[in-house]
Image (cartoon, helix red, strand yellow):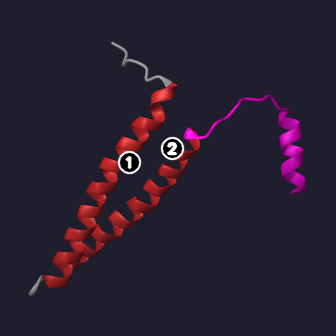
Amino acid sequence: MRDPEIPTSEVPDLLHAGLHEIGGSSGRIHRIATLLERRGKGLDEEVRSWLCHMASAAAHLDVSLQAVRRYAEALDLPHERSASSILHVLHSASVA
């Protein structure tokens, strides 16, 4: 059975909701890892390394989420379709 299609008009709202949920989880992971790394007395180097890795991964995820957020915001902007020749696009790109 095929999954039902999502109307294009609903995509921005779904992206915003998903970004909010993922961003909240990412922030919590980053805060927990940072807190444990700072206050965890007697942690061995392997555990500290994993905590640092978790915090770094959460920070990278935040950067990716920002890019998707900008994309979702662009979907909210008014737009119209227009046809253009690929040769014109390639020529414009080569002289820029």
Q: Is residue 23 left or right of residue 69?
A: left
Asked which secondary structure carries label 2, the reply is helix
Image quarter for residue 46? Answer: bottom left
Residue 17 is one of the magenta-drawn residues: no
Q: Is residue 46 visible?
A: no
Tell me the residue that label 1 is attached to: 19
Q: Residue at position x 88%, y 37% from top?
A: 87
Q: CA distance from mark 1 to mark 2?
A: 9 Å
Residue 91 is one of the magenta-drawn residues: yes
Q: Position of residue 18 (x, y in %)?
A: 35, 43
Evaluate if marks 1 and 2 touch, with contact meaning CB atoms under 8 Å apart: yes
The number of numbered badges drawn on the structure is 2
Crowding near the residue tagged with mark 2, few <14, some 14–19, many ≥20 C-alpha atoms within 10 Å: some
Tell me the residue that label 2 is attached to: 72
- Residue 73 - label: none
Q: Is residue 11 visible?
A: yes
Q: Amino acid at mark 2?
A: Ala
Q: Position of residue 16 (x, y in %)?
A: 41, 43
Crowding near the residue tagged with mark 1, few <14, some 14–19, many ≥20 C-alpha atoms within 10 Å: some
Q: Is residue 80 left or right of residue 96?
A: left
Q: Quadrant of the N terminus?
A: top left
The residue stretch that appears in magenta: 76-96
Q: Is residue 87 left or right of residue 4?
A: right
Q: Residue at position x 35%, y 70% from top?
A: 56
